[in-house]
Image: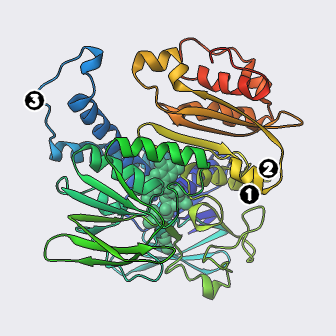
Amino acid sequence: MSYDLIVIGSGPGGYVCAVKASQLGMKVAVVEKRATYGGTCLNVGCIPSKALLHASEQYAHAAHGMESLGVKLSGVELDHDKLLAHKDAVVKSNVEGVAFLFKKNKIDGFQGTGKVVSAGKVQVTKEDGSTEDLEAKNIVIATGSDVAGIPGVDVAIDEETIVSSTGAIALKKVPEKMIVVGGGVIGLELGSVWSRLGAKVTVVEFLDKILGTMDGEVSKQTQKLLAKQGLDFKLSAKVTAVEKGKKGAKVTFEPVKGGDAETLDADIVLISTGRKPYTEGLGLEDAGVKLDERGRVEIDGHFKTNVEGIYAIGDVVKGPMLAHKAEDEGVALAEILAGQAGHVNYDVIPSVVYTQPEVASVGKTEEELKKDGVAYNVGKFPFMANGRARAMETTDGFVKVLADKETDRVLGVHIVGFGAGEMIQEASVLMEFGGSSEDLGRTCHAHPTMSEAVKEAAMAAFFKPIHM
Ligand code: FAD
């Protein structure tokens, strides 16, 4: 079979690229080795984790959180099987949605492992071992990422007791004790899920802060709020062993700066120390496609590898491992292949942690601005001073706007608060258009909304807020 474009991998990068390319008139095929489309994100990542986060939030709210609103509930119980069934149903409807989009856009799907034989040639090996050869003008590698282990530690993930995120979204019961190795986004989200449902969760983190790349103040505040919810934190702790016992598993760690080792045991240990690009079985070496020093497919500014006609996008290339980054790269690449000017603005890629409260960030952190020697103004506004937040009892957190001292252009916005993941989008749009804190602070915001805190933080950056 011959195509204009073959995409290997149907995650947010691959499927969006395929749909866009088809919309732009290309004949497209997608090769996916999983039984369903949608990649990590739809099958075992973004979507199932959010289904569990929402359900566990509702449970915790019903079980502990509504008396002060005058809502009394009793006999609140968790139906574990239904919880998992909800998550599975959400995944099913989403992956079927991608299959529908392929059909609608006349994209041919091939189930099997795709191997790049050479420029223009892909071989698909199906589950029964049979192969099929495909040809295309262009090939896109969108094979995503896989769980990374703990550097220097031999960890046997069995997805039952010692789990990755994939096992952690399918636990057969709520663990009594859970250890989360790695205090990044995935560890905090899934740690929150099981903590809300009753597990005693301890997060062991190598760095001296959680959410390592986020603004320092944001990470401190988030840790405080999660600790209030019952999560324990062991920071600056280097894990040296993770061992399965007769029952459960134990984790040994020592202070990064040296000192006595400590061992904790738990029913479940979640390894959430990051993800690595996935290129196994793709035949890139034979095809002459270069990888960089971190095992990612090396690309130029237009997603092109060193081999003519072979491109790569998403988690398998440099940049933040986020679904929307992969999607935007998919769109931009399809446009480039269609002769248009596809482009991704890597300075404005929001990131959201779906804990409660949510944590959202776009642009530069204070630490980055300091390091780059950029002079900036800070505007901050706490949700405690926001009327809607008081009405909803969601006063935890704040908004921080960072603007260039000279030009007032907004360089970064960081939010800890209920609905932060939705509120951050207005900051992204503003920054995409090169807006200033005054632009944001003078934009009329509906009252009463949590978003008024974003406006007030912007006002604080260029002059003064009203309500503080
Ligand atoms: P993937 O989604 O990984 O898809 C790659 C696909 O390629 C897979 O289906 C794989 O089976 C297939 N494949 C690989 N090799 C081959 C081959 N040789 N032949 C055929 N098929 C192949 N990101 C967010 O933005 N927001 C979130 O809330 C979020 N939550 C997450 C929660 C968890 C628990 C995890 C693990 C990740 C989360 N992410 C989130 C990250 C997000 O899932 C990834 O950034 C995103 O999936 C990357 O998309 P991709 O298209 O590059 O690759």
Residue 41, can we see it?
Answer: no
Seen as rendered, the residue at the extreme front is 259
Q: Is mark 3 within 8 Å of ligand 1?
A: no
The CA span between labels 1 and 2 is: 7 Å
Q: Is residue 66 left or right of residue 10?
A: left
Seen at 38% across and 74% down, the residue is 253
In the drawing, does residue 212 fall left or right of residue 250?
Answer: right
Q: Residue 263: horizontal and vertical position, in percent? A: 29, 73
Q: At label 1, which amino acid type do we have?
A: Leu
| Relative to 292, 147 lies left or right | left
Dot 1: what SS?
helix
Asked if residue 270 lies left or right of residue 140, the reply is left
Using the rendered view, name the quadrant where residue 306 is placed: bottom right
- Outermost top residue: 447
Question: How many labels were placed on the picture?
Answer: 3
The quarter of the rendered structure image containing the C terminus is: top right
Q: How is the image coloured?
A: rainbow
Query: Above or below — where is 3 with respect to 87?
Result: below
Based on the displayed image, in which of its 4 quarters is residue 431 positioned? Answer: top right
* Residue 337, label in figure: 1
Q: Amino acid at mark 3?
A: Gly
Ligand 1 is within 8 Å of the C-beta of the residue at disc 1: no
Q: Nearer the viewer, residue 308 or 271?
A: 271
Residue 329, image x, y percentages: 66, 54
| Residue that carries the numbered disc 2 in the rendered image | 340
* Residue on which the image places disc 3: 75
Mark 3 and mark 2 residues within 8 Å of each other at the beta carbon: no
Labels 3, 1: front one: 3
The amino acid at mark 2 is Gln
Asked whether 129 or 302 is in front, the reply is 302
Structural distance between the alpha carbons of marks 3 and 2: 59 Å
